[in-house]
Image (spheres, helix red, strand yellow):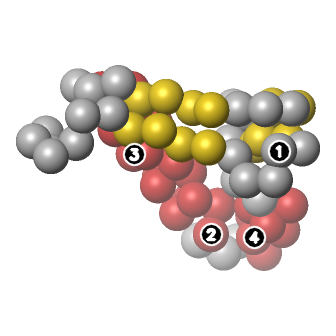
Amino acid sequence: TDKETDIVIIKGAGGKAFCAGGDIRAVTEAGKVGGPFGKDFFREEYILNNTIGTYQKPYVALIDGITMGG
């Protein structure tokens, strides 16, 4: 782990809503034409989810308004 990092804080921009998901329309359209975007997107997404889930330091999400994620 990074010895200079004590805590990770993420914050949504705009204050109206927070969405932790990706561009579902882009993933769907790429899947229709057989492009690699969907597979690449989910590979990166799961790597990030694993990193967050196993991170050894506090990880805080400051969320205000409607919240979506998956």
Residue 10 left/right relative to 52: right
Mark 1 burial class by Cα count in 10 Å: few <14, some 14-19, many 20+: few
- Quadrant in the rendering for residue 35: bottom right
Q: Mark 3 points at which residue?
A: 47
Asked if disc 4 and disc 1 are in contact, CB closer than 8 Å, the reply is no
Q: Mark 2 touching mark 1, by CB under 8 A?
A: no
How far apart are the two marked residues, 3 and 1, measured between alpha carbons? 27 Å
Answer with the quarter of the image where residue 15 lies. top right
Give the SS element for disc 1. loop
| Mark 4, residue position | 30
| Mark 3 or 4, nearer chain start | 4
- Who's the residue at 22% across and 42% down the image? 5
Which residue is under mark 1? 15
Residue located 88% across and 32% down the image: 66
Residue tagged 2: 37
Q: Disc 3 to disc 2, how far (Cα)?
A: 15 Å
Q: How far apart are marks 4 and 1 (CA)?
A: 30 Å
- Mark 4 or mark 2: name the one nearer the start of the chain: 4
- Residue 58, above or below 45: above
Q: Is residue 15 visible?
A: yes
Q: Which of marks 3 and 4 is in front?
A: 3
For the residue marked with disc 2, what is the amino acid? Phe
Residue at the image position 79 percent from the left and 67 percent from the top: 26
Q: Nearer the viewer, mark 2 or mark 1?
A: 1
Tell me whether circle 3 and circle 1 mark residues in contact (CB < 8 Å).
no
Element type where label 4 sits in the image? helix
Between residue 51 and residue 63, name the one nearer to us.
Answer: 63
Q: Which residue lies furthest to the left in this view?
A: 3
